Amino acid sequence: MIRTLLHVHTDYSHDSDASLSDIVSAVKREGIDCVSITDHDDIRGALALQRGGEIRVIVGEEISTAEGHLIGLFLHEHIPPGLPASATARLIHDQGGVVLAPHPFSILCDSSLGRACESIAPQLDAVEIFNAQNPLPWQDWRAARFAERHGLTGYVGGDSHLRDWPLAPCYQIMPNFSDAASFLAALRQATFVCRRHPPGYLVRSALGILSSKLTGRRPAGFGANQLGDASPDSRTDSGQAGLAGRARS
């Protein structure tokens, strides 16, 4: 049985200040056996950590579809944002990947699938039934009911973004796995450890988002490795992949 942490961001996401070195340190410190890195519309950080070999990594991406966010796991190529959710799910499956619905009914962000969940349900492999960054438990309950109604596997997501706070308030204890198919089989047997990020984490995260919206500038370190307007093809480039010598943001 292994501790598997799903839904983690690095500073390759605009809303995270956690460097790759921060992630490695936290995973080792908190006793996590496997972590999925799911940066916003970018897989470079996940690929870099996987190549570094210090921790076990599932390469993922939290993709901004036209209807809301989907997560793809076990990816080897970047999936572009802005496509319909159904087309995005097909591209994930074309890579042999797994399609997850993160925070599907959260009202505190503008990126949840919401009503689109019903139409995309046949293409989903798993649903986030507990999100550690979500302070409103009824939204998780709604996600759990949705998953049960559609016969979908549930999972718990850390949705972790910040470097100076615990990385894994929640995770799954599950059988070991080797690929996407065995991952899903193992997830169906998982035991969940469910805790939420503390209030201080939520306050700092909210202040960072508010500051970005009011000033047009991200707080120091946030999105330090975000690509900006770089071409989609370069998102799989290993140019900054090495962990050695990476400065903390």
Image (cartoon, rainbow, N blue to C red):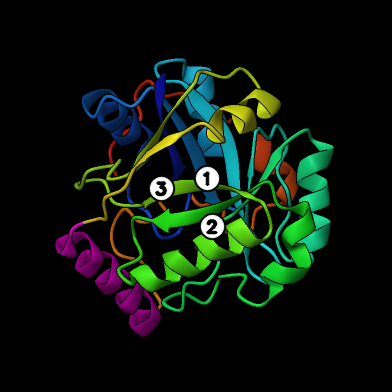
Mark 1 residue crowding within 10 angstroms, few (<14) / some (14–19) / many (20+): many
> Viewer-nearest of labels 1 and 3?
1
Mark 1 residue type: Thr
Q: Are marks 2 and 1 in contact (CB under 8 Å)?
A: yes
**Which mark sits nearer the N-terminus, 3 or 2?**
3
Q: Secondary structure at mark 1?
A: strand
Give the side of residue 139 with respect to residue 72, left or right.
left
Mark 2 residue crowding within 10 angstroms, few (<14) / some (14–19) / many (20+): many
Instruction: Compare residues 97 and 243 and report the one nearer the observer.
Output: 97
Residue 11: which disc? 3
Residue 102: which disc? 2
Mark 3 residue crowding within 10 angstroms, few (<14) / some (14–19) / many (20+): many
Q: What span is colored magenta in the figure? A: 198-215
Instruction: Compare residues 104 and 237 and report the one nearer the observer.
Output: 104
Q: CA distance from mark 3 to mark 2?
A: 19 Å
Residue depicted at x 26% and y 32% = 26
Instruction: Compare residues 149 and 17 and report the one nearer the observer.
Output: 149
- Residue 102 point in image, percent of width and height: 54, 57
Residue 38: which disc? 1
Q: What secondary structure predominates along the stretch shown in magenta? A: helix
Q: CA distance from mark 1 to mark 3?
A: 11 Å
